[in-house]
Image: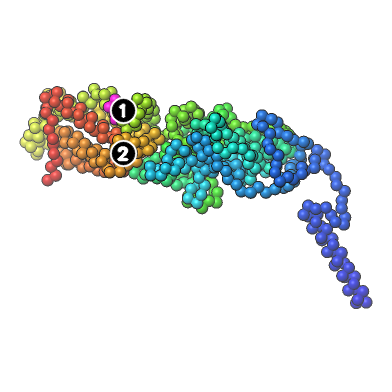
Amino acid sequence: MNDIRRTVLWVIFGFSMVLLWDKWQVYNGRQATFFPSPVTQTAGASAPPPAHATPAPPPAASAAPAASAPQAPAAAHEAAAAVPVVAHERITVSTDVLRLTFDNEGGSLVGGELLHHQGSQDDPKPFVLLEDDSRHVYVAQTGLIGGPFPTHKTFMRIAPGPHELRDGDQELTVRFESPDLGGVKLVKSYTLKRGAYDVAVRHEVVNTGGTPVSPQLYLQLVRDGNQPDGAVPFYSTFTGPAVYTDAKKYQKITFKDIKEKKVEIPAEATDGYIAMVQHYFATAWLLPDGTPRTLHVNAADVGSPAPDCCYRVQEITPFGELAPGQTKTIEARLFVGPQVEKTLENLAPGLELIKDYGYLTILAKPLYWLLDEIHSVVGNWGWSIVGLVLLLKLAFYWLNAKAYGSMAKMKALNPRIQDLRARLKDKPQQMQQEMMRIYREEKVNPLGGCLPIAIQIPVFIALYWVLLSSVEMRHAPWIGWVTDLSTKDPYFILPILMTLSTLLQTALNPAPPDPMQAKMMWIMPLAFSVMFFMFPAGLVLYWLTNNLLSIAQQWVINTRMGVPPQFHLPKFR
């Protein structure tokens, strides 16, 4: 009896194991071994296409995508599962001005070198703008949202083609094709042209499923929050995202504001661009005007080992509804290059504003135009700076003559004022009344030397920003030892000459009656000059030229007015 019971239990156990195995097969997507159910096909669905190791070459951009019967979303997922895993791969393509590295993970741009710009004065290698490593992250990415569609994390197949712009060719194209995901295939094409820093980016979306889909395209720039290599801490330049719309114009967003969630940009727009800006160089996504888009700036956790990573500026635009088998395309441009004002103006409205002139853009733009015109004649940016300062001095000659004339009169009256101060030092109110009487009789305005100079200050500050922001100054030589106007003088000759010229200019001015003010008149130029030892040589050359021309003009005006130039040396007793 016990043997029979034991046998029945073993039979039940064995049959249970068979049923479990059968259900396990079904669970893993295979047909049942012992109790197969009849295969029924849903209306409108077709069998998944056969898997293949290498997809067929993509059709031409103008041709309609090849498609048999539309696939239902489930069939599309099965087709995607049948596509073999694509190995991680990066390719580098080159034109005469750009060397770009693309990653087949999302078809993203992860490396960008500017072949006409050196990394540094001592490093002949091209300047690296985009990169993705343990130190820095700065990449351009695109993808689809609105469903389980291809994103910048989807591995894509790279179409065969040339990777270098050959002699005689004017452009080359790099093409990426995603697998079917969510009933959608994304084909992304980058077209690089000879001599151009803007790359045409074509996003072609194919509905390979059996139901309508409404994907949205996102374009984003992601970078870490660190200053670029070689940044100089002694003068401030902006690094970070920027957004331009016709409604709000140009808006810079600091990394600090992003961290503190204080970003205020338009949520929607139909024009403008998004950009990532740093000193001399920038990247920007450009969509055609009239294309609706939403804008976002936020922190992005990309899992990178790079410090302070990362921040993202993004715009999203809809494709609209795609019927089964339908294809739609969105064209965009990606700018990767130097902030050359003429180039930026020709690419998109307002793009030249990424070359940051601060609040004095209205003055800086004509100054840059004049500087560029002078350079087209003399062919040297150092001499162009000298020529521009000379022209500004001529333009403001009348104002300067008024200022120096007033100073000359003050200098002539200085002995009387000093005697007056000595006699009435215990009667300050009477002393002030007597001084004002002398000024009225001699028709001298004590502030007459300050006002004309104050009017010129905004112009010279604007010129400062022109020289600081212009990439043309980068690695531009002047004479002899000055081989790079954008970096400090290696031997500090220009700063020393500028300091001496500042002290000479101070000595030529009439000494203030107040001894404390007289001391400050000497201490301030010295303290101010210390900063210039770390300033770019082009800026120091500009100040030195301005000082020398001011001294020459002051000397001539004083001589003409019969007030021989005198040196007022400091008294620090």
Residue 220 locus on image (x, y percent): 55, 40
**Disc 2 marks which amino acid?**
Val
Residue 16 locus on image (x, y percent): 84, 64
- Of badges 1 and 2, nearer the viewer stands 2
Which of the image's four quarters has the C terminus? top left
Q: Nearer the viewer, residue 423 or 555?
A: 555
Which of the image's four quarters has the N terminus? bottom right
- Residue highlighted by disc 1: 388
**Disc 1 marks which amino acid?**
Leu
Of mark 1 and mark 2, the one earlier in the sequence is 1
> Which region is colored magenta?
385-391
- Residue highlighted by disc 2: 482
Q: Residue furthest front?
A: 167
Which residue lies at the image location 39% right of the left edge and 40% below the top edge?
237
10 Å crowding of disc 2: few (<14), some (14-19), many (20+)? many
> Is 389 inside the magenta-drawn segment?
yes
Q: Nearer the viewer, residue 298 or 181?
A: 181
* Residue 49 position by quadrant: top right
Which residue lies at the image location 45% right of the left edge and 47% below the top edge?
226
**On the rendered structure, is 572 left or right of 70?**
left
